[in-house]
Structure formats: structure tokens, C-alpha cells
Amino acid sequence: MFLPIRHENMSARRWPVVTLGLIAVNIVIFLITHYGVEQPSIKVVTEVPGHILVLAAEHPELSMSPQTRQLVSYFRERAPQFWAILKDQKRPPVDAWEAEIREITNPATLQGEMDSLDQQYLELRASVPSLHYGFIPSERAPFTYVTANFLHGSWLHLIGNMWFLWLAGFVLEDTWGRIVYIVFYLVAGAAALQFYAWTNPESMRPLIGASGAVAGLMGAFLVRFPKMKIEMSFLFFVRYRFKASAYWLLPLWLLSEMFYGSLYGTSSPVAHWAHVGGFVMGGLVACALRFSHLEHKVNKAIEQKTSWTCDPAIDQATDMMEQGQ
């Protein structure tokens, strides 16, 4: 596997407090959500709402809670073609559960099954952070465009994202300033999630992780520092290090994400199209910052804050001393 180690310029004019703060917040939230609640399997997380949609499509007369009704209505409006497929009872059953449901004709039994699924769904939404705060393309709750970027599923998931965040983030924070940088980070993360929702509008799998926002940083890094060399480590039985310029290494990574996104689609546990959307958004925003001269203004302000300057009175006193006054 290929792993980025560092890049040529590891210095900054001041402490990258925003980047360090983002890393700290992600770690704290991971510790709270990962060890504070019992995490169900992804099969349970997606299967329960999936069965609700199937049952609601085939038997729209069944009653359900307002929250579950909202799930059904949102999915029906956002993915009408997929909803039409669910309503077609001539299609093959999606699983053994649906095959059994189709054999039931008693309305009371069907309502009892919906009540059971409804209760399970409400319990999952209340207890599972990824369902409540993760981004679900078929629902798209507004606040999850932010919260999903701070949830992670495992230590490996967290460490990988935070390492890339550090490598690209602290240099861009030093270049753009703290306010522009944090706004860009949040916008890139939201754009990555939205791009994934456009490519998979019917998906009920919650998206979590900072990788979309980090991909945005990588896209901006490519535009801002295309010639900067990144030290890579190749690990496959033996360890080999080499340096590569950003202008060919990062586009290669983008092409690989597009390839795997096209190949696996929603079956992959990795949201490849979210990475693509974040990367493209990051590159476009970085171009806009450069050509609008906002980056130059921010750099000038940072230089004034970090450069050593004397008080005018001290300069005047020095001149007078040199004249013997």
C-alpha cells in the first residue's frame, strides 16, 4: 500500500490551531460515540428502514409513526423511480423476509409487522449516532451535512483521515488564514456529501467520516502547491520511500476514486464519489480564492501579524540617537 509521510515544506508562520482543533474534536467525538453506545451491524442499520420502505410501498394503507412516515415520504419524493420498482409486486423479492410478507393477506398481521419495524427504527434512530448524525442520502437532514464529517467508524478510519487532514490542512491554514480555512473545510465536507447524494439518491446507508472534507483539502492543495513533493512510503513485504510531485500524485488518486466509484457503486463501504465531489469542490474554491485576490489579502494580513515591526516612536528615537540628540 502507498502511504504519504510528509511533504517538503513542513514549516508554518504560526501554530495551526484550527487544524489541531479539528483533529482534537474528531478524536473526542470518536471516543464518545464509539465507546459510549453499542454499535449495531451495518446490516441491521440498513435492513430495518429497507423493510419499512418495501412494506409501505406494497401496502400504503398501513399506519406508522410520524418519524417513520417522514422517512417513507422523503424517499418516495427523492427516488421516485426506485419507489416505483418497490411498488411492483411482480418483481423478485429482495430477500426471504419480503417473500414471507407477500404470503400474508391478513391486514392486522401486516400492521403488526409494520408496528414492529417502526419500533425498531425509532430505537435505532435514538441510540445509534451514525443514524441520527450521519448523512443518509435518502433523507438528507440539513444538520447532518456538518455532523457526519465528525463521526468515524473505527480507529483505522479516524487515524487515516486525521493524518491526511494534518498533511494538507496545516499548510492551507497558514496560506488562507484561520477563518477562510475553517469555512472552506465545512463547505468542502458538505459538498462531498451532496455529490454522493446526487450519485446515490436512494441509499439508506449513513455516511460518516471526514474524508470528504479532507479530499477537498487535497484538491485545494493540488491547485495551490502543484509542484510540492510529497514523500511516499510503499509497504508490501518491503518498505520503500520515494518522493512525488503533487501535480501527478493527487490526480492519480482522484482517478482511482472515480474508477472504484464506478466499479463498486454503493456496494463499497467507502464513499468514493464523496471523495471525488470534495476533491473537485476543493480545487474550484482554491482557484476562486487565487483569482479573486482574496488569498493575497489574507496573506498580507497574516504577514503583518507575524512579522516583527518596531513602534514608530522607537524608530524616531533611534534616528535622534544617531544624530547625537
Image: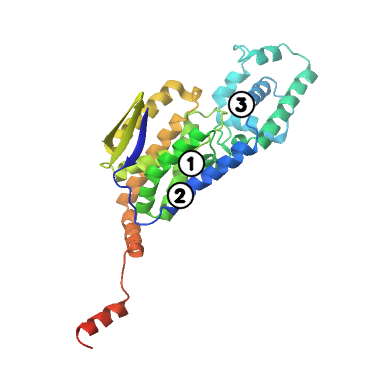
Give the number of the mark in front: 1 or 2: 2
Task: Give the residue at mark 2.
Answer: 20
For the residues marked 1 and 2, what is the alpha-carbon distance in whole angstroms? 20 Å
For the residues marked 3 and 2, what is the alpha-carbon distance in whole angstroms? 31 Å
Residue 321 visible in rendering: yes
Q: Which mark is residue 176?
A: none
Identify the element where label 2 is drawn.
helix
| Point 33% across, 59% down: residue | 297
Query: Looking at the rendering, which quadrant does residue 275 occupy?
Result: top left
* Picture coordinates of residue 231, whole percent (x, y): 30, 37
* Picture coordinates of residue 130, whole percent (x, y): 59, 35
Whichever of callouts 3 and 2 sits on the residue coming sooner in the sequence is: 2
Whichever of callouts 3 and 1 sits on the residue coming sooner in the sequence is: 3
Q: Residues within 10 Å of mark 2 (few under 14, many from 20)?
A: some
Residue type at mark 2: give it.
Leu
* Picture coordinates of residue 29, whole percent (x, y): 57, 43
Whichever of callouts 1 and 2 sits on the residue coming sooner in the sequence is: 2
Task: Give the residue at mark 3.
Answer: 41
Residue type at mark 1: give it.
Ala
Q: Is residue 188 above or below residue 232?
A: below
Give the number of the mark in front: 3 or 2: 2
Task: Give the residue at mark 1.
Answer: 190
| Point 48% across, 39% down: residue | 210
CB within 8 Å, label 3 to label 2: no
